[in-house]
Image (spheres, helix red, strand yellow):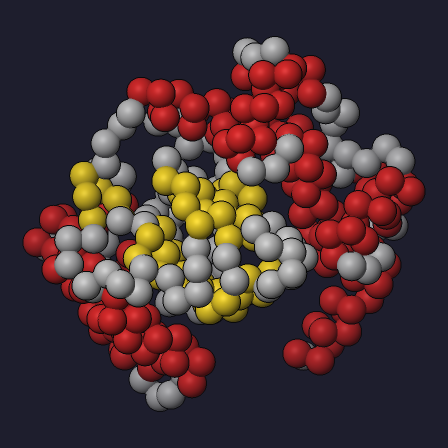
Amino acid sequence: MSTYNLREHIEYHHSLLPYSYSKIEMRNGKPDVLFHWHPECEFIFVEKGSARFHIDNHIFYSNAGDIILIHPNALHSIHPVDDKTPHVYQSFNVHLDLIGLSIDDYSGIRYLKTLQNGLTEFIVHIRPTHPAYVMLYKTLHKIFACIEHKEPFHSLLLKSLVNELFYHIYSSSLTQTRAEHPDAYRREEKIRLVIDYMNKHFDEPLTIDTLSQVCGYSQSHFMNFFKQNVGVSAIDYLIQTRLKHVVTRLKDSNDSILTIATECGFSNLAHFNRQFKKLFNCSPRMYRKLHHQQTKELD
């Protein structure tokens, strides 16, 4: 299966410790986590609220207390379903290199490489009623605490805890052989194809007609297909993709807001400002100012 160019770059806490941790709060449907993939495993604990998870061919709704297991290179998205209740979760991303993916011993070959190469996949949705839940919950929260406190030699403890987590996953039969379903395979290929096209051509004038031709669908069928499978309309996805590039430019360059907006595909400045404020609850100028202030405080 082609992977195209949806890969998300995970910034590690340390270049020699391939993991990242974050706590995310979604309010009023934002931020919407659009389809992407990364070579790391991702482990999510849902603290509050509900969201629609789409992980490869698996679609489900989360509830508070759920644990979500996302295997390497899985195409996934997260969409909040209730604008009134925040969706809060903790996310731990870890590359299997941390526990010996590159070592050709029994565990590396038998368990880690098959998972990294897509021959096996996680059982993705673990509810509190699952027999393995308590063990996963305890180990995952030990990992969160280890990262938060960063006591001396915490890297050794973290490595042992990740090994413990994978022990519980495998001993509880929470992996399975990945089966390819022809219809699901074709659907996923179409999604990857059109999203990759958007990511490569976001700075160009893109229309529904152009995007539907990429998929080989009529415009009406394409719009229904995209919304049904991705969870947002193609236009909304394109706008959010452009805004992600805008945010990067606001942080990393001194270019004018007009230049950034134009070079990221927005031909109308008023429309750009409305869309930016709708997603980030502030103007582009204020966003840049707040980012620079936070950067100075960290320095």
Q: Residue at x 32, y 78 (%)?
A: 142
Kindly tell me whether residue 233 is visible in this rendering: yes
Q: Residue at x 81, y 60 (%)?
A: 282
Considering depth in this image, is 166 or 20 the residue closer to the camera?
166
Q: Is residue 231 above or below residue 129?
A: above
Considering depth in this image, is 167 or 48 the residue closer to the camera?
48
Query: Which quarter shows the C terminus?
Result: bottom right
Judge from the rendering whether residue 49 lies leftward or rightward of residue 27; answer left or right: left
Kindly tell me whether residue 162 is visible in this rendering: no
Q: Residue at x 61, y 11 (%)?
A: 218
Q: Is residue 2 above or below residue 49?
A: above
Residue 293 position within the rendered picture, expressed as x and y whole percent measured from the top left: 77, 74
Query: Which quarter shows the N terminus?
Result: top left
Residue 250 position within the rendered picture, expressed as x and y whole percent measured from the top left: 76, 55
Judge from the rendering whether residue 248 lies leftward or rightward of residue 91; answer left or right: right
- Answer with the quarter of the image where residue 161 lies: bottom left
Residue 202 position within the rendered picture, expressed as x and y whole percent measured from the top left: 69, 32
Judge from the rendering whether residue 194 lies leftward or rightward of residue 16; answer left or right: right
Q: Is residue 299 above or below residue 90?
A: below
Q: Residue at x 50, y 57 (%)?
A: 50
Judge from the rendering whether residue 238 lies leftward or rightward of residue 174; answer left or right: right
Residue 12 position within the rendered picture, expressed as x and y whole percent measured from the top left: 46, 63
Count of number-bearing discs: 0
Considering depth in this image, is 104 or 27 the residue closer to the camera?
27
